[in-house]
Amino acid sequence: MERMPVISPPSRITDLVGLKEKGLVVTCRTGFEILPVDFQHRNNPFQAYIFLCRYAGEVDTDAYEFRKCYARGCPNNLCPHVSQAVMIANRYLQRDYQKLEQAGIKFDRRLFTLEEMTVKFDGYQEEHGPILAIHDYITMAEEGSAISIKPTLEFVPAVEHFANYKNRMIFLMVNFAITCLGKSHHYERCLACYPMEREVAEKQEKVDIANARLRLLFEAFDGASIQYEKKFF
């Protein structure tokens, strides 16, 4: 009898963990890409770098592949600085690695490196202060700090530049406007993306993924008593 394939190919780390917990054999390989991307944010075109990890492997014998954007960085004030993006990407990558390890899924533990840019902007953190991710603010709220967060959600068009071709993409971005200890901060996350040419086929799936990631963050906000506006794509 022909074996039935996995119903839905995994498209998130959470999917891999869930399939492993169901007793399926899950393999995982990682591959990194740091791509120059032309973004069109409202009327402000700018170039940035996105930090991607491609996850590939098999669930039993069914092949899967998906990618996850961990950060976006540029050397201007239109998005987080490149040196910030390297560190933020690695912090979120390590959180995902922990989930895979706890589920018993084997993989190659590697981190993003961008040595030339990291060296070039080596003094950025000293000049602008420590680099905080959204989970740092959650921890601060759990420790008693009063924090409020206003998310802004946007579909941002962009063009990814590979060696021999270009991809026209839509990125689902959230910008968190954070008020903490009397100061205002901004923090952004890419929650999903899809090719423009496959908008009809993939948009709803990616919106669902982005909203699922938002729900997890909002649950953490609730647990830490953070005041926030609940918004979804």
Image: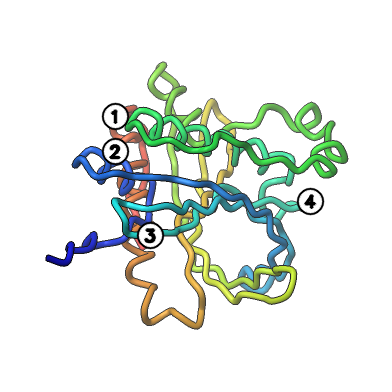
Question: Amino acid type of disc 3?
Answer: Ala
**SS state under label 1:** helix
| Nearest the eye: 9 or 205 | 9
Give the distance between the C-alpha atoms of the residues marked 4 and 1, in whole angstroms.
35 Å
Going from the N terminus, do you reach mark 4 or mark 1 first?
4
| Nearest the eye: 189 or 8 | 8
Going from the N terminus, do you reach mark 3 or mark 2 first?
3
Question: Amino acid type of disc 4?
Answer: Pro
Is the residue under label 2 in contact with that under label 1 (CB below 8 Å)?
A: yes
Mark 1 or mark 3: which is in front? 3
- Circle 2 residue: 219
- Circle 4 residue: 75
Question: Amino acid type of disc 2?
Answer: Glu
Give the distance between the C-alpha atoms of the residues marked 3 and 2, in whole angstroms.
32 Å
- Circle 3 residue: 63
Give the distance between the C-alpha atoms of the residues marked 2 and 4, in whole angstroms.
33 Å
Q: Is residue 54 above or below residue 183?
A: below
Quadrant that contains the N terminus? bottom left
Is the residue under label 3 in contact with that under label 4 (CB below 8 Å)?
A: no
Determine whether, in the image, residue 171 is placed left or right of residue 220. right
Q: Is residue 180 above or below residue 171?
A: above
Give the distance between the C-alpha atoms of the residues marked 4 and 3, in whole angstroms.
38 Å
